[in-house]
Image: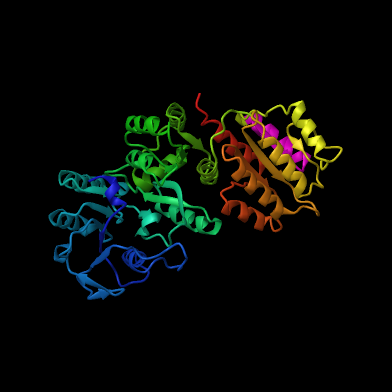
Amino acid sequence: MSIKHIFNPKSISVIGASRDPKSVGYGILKNLVKGCVLRCKYCSPFIGKVFAVNPFAEEILGIRCEKSILNIKDKIDIAIIATPVAIVENQVNLCIKKGVNGVIIVSAGFSEIGERGKRLQDKIVNRLRKAKITLIGPNCLGIIRTSTHLNASFAPSMPPKGDIAFISQSGALIDSIIDWAIEERYGLSSIVSLGNSADKDASDFIEYFGKDKETKVITVYMEGLKDGKKFLNVSSRIGKKKPIIVVKAGRTMHGAKAVSSHTGSLAGDYEVYKSAFKQARVILTESIEEMFDLAKALSTQPIPKKNSIAIITNGGGAGVLCADYCAEFGVKLAEIDKNTIEELNKSGVMHPSYSRSNPLDIIGDALPERYRIAVDTLLSKEYISGIIVIQTLQTMTDTIEDAKIVIEANKKYPSKSIICTYMGGKFTKSSVKYLQENNIPDYNDVRKSAKAMAVLVSRIKK
């Protein structure tokens, strides 16, 4: 069975559905039939049919319980198994007999606990492969597809709909990222918890998301790889057309040891991974935050036509720092020509002491009109392919109007890349939110902005 059908089921059976509100089996069923526990606006019940299997209950959450999946008359696309590990093998056999299309095993107690668990895991995988049934897990959180309201997991909520796919070898990490995505209005297309990756691994999902029209950027939290050659082959091919961003755990001896006990994976030598990722055009990041920072830029902004960028700032120090970081990350600053300077001079709004160079320091007392002239003038030039807009907070700064200027410029110059750094906190919060709502990436530090522009520049076709 293809992964495509896993994300588009018409019927789901929860084996191990529970009446205990604190249990995994209850959480999964509730997500499917009621929506999330937070009752947030991003969640709604699954639109297909949902069946519950529990031999000791009549009904749960208004869903009639069957004693076995074989008692369900309807065709089942996905069976989610959330039972004690001791009876998982038997439930898998019943799923094979039923002829389900895919199985998600959230139960733990397999390869991550040692050789005994690995033998059981291998036995289950072999049987499912022989029956041509796709397996996700075991020891996983489940999957989420925002466009179809599919929350086939025990995550507490569903993130906002977006175009970034997240593949993770940690289920608990997913929960926190969903919470963050809701708070920051950060959109995701799909989430996959790999667990032990007994059947389908990161490479299989990278392959799928590489062809998925709803996904622009693929992000991966990785602990280890079982088939490095397969990953390199897939990533080299997919990475040419869609960015793949990875944060790799298990970089140290202590981290590698923790990886082994977490999902039963081998972390491997980090330097080998770095070299291999570079060869495959995979973007390696240092943290989860950085991974999603870069994904935000890649999913919302066009790739510059050339490496020729300008910095606009109302704070000289912030502009100098940004220039340093741009040099460090390989972003080339355009030399602002005499004609452009002459045009800025004639506008009548530039401060007599503005820098007349790149970074273009328009001075701390800059009102929105000065920002508008600077942004519009630079973006209109063929030799400038993108801008980084920095705003430091002064008493006269109008953060909302400055944000509106950037948003209008983004619409007027759709082929130019725009990255913002609206520095501050309480007084800039509303403008930052306004930028994000209009798909303008904003970062709270100029280093992050320079790194975001660098990753856009790195995608320029040589």
Residue 203 in percent (x, y) is at: 34, 38
Q: Which residues are magenta?
A: 309-328
Q: Is residue 67 visible?
A: yes
Q: Is residue 400 above or below residue 339?
A: below
Q: Is residue 444 visible?
A: no
Residue 229 in percent (x, y) is at: 33, 29
Reply yes or no: does residue 311 show up in magenta. yes
Q: Quadrant of residue 349?
A: top right
Q: What colouring style does the render use? A: rainbow
Tell me if 424 is positioned left or right of 126 in this view.
right
Query: Looking at the image, which residue is at 73% across and 38% down?
Result: 319
Q: Nearer the viewer, residue 75 or 341?
A: 341
Residue 193 in percent (x, y) is at: 37, 50
Q: Nearer the viewer, residue 149 or 31?
A: 149
Outermost residue, top side: 462
Query: Looking at the image, which residue is at 28% across and 62% down?
Result: 48
Q: Is residue 187 above or below residue 381?
A: below
Q: Quadrant of residue 226?
A: top left
Outermost residue, right side: 352
Residue 268 in percent (x, y) is at: 40, 34
Query: Looking at the image, which residue is at 45% across and 48% down?
Result: 163
Q: Quadrant of residue 108?
A: bottom left
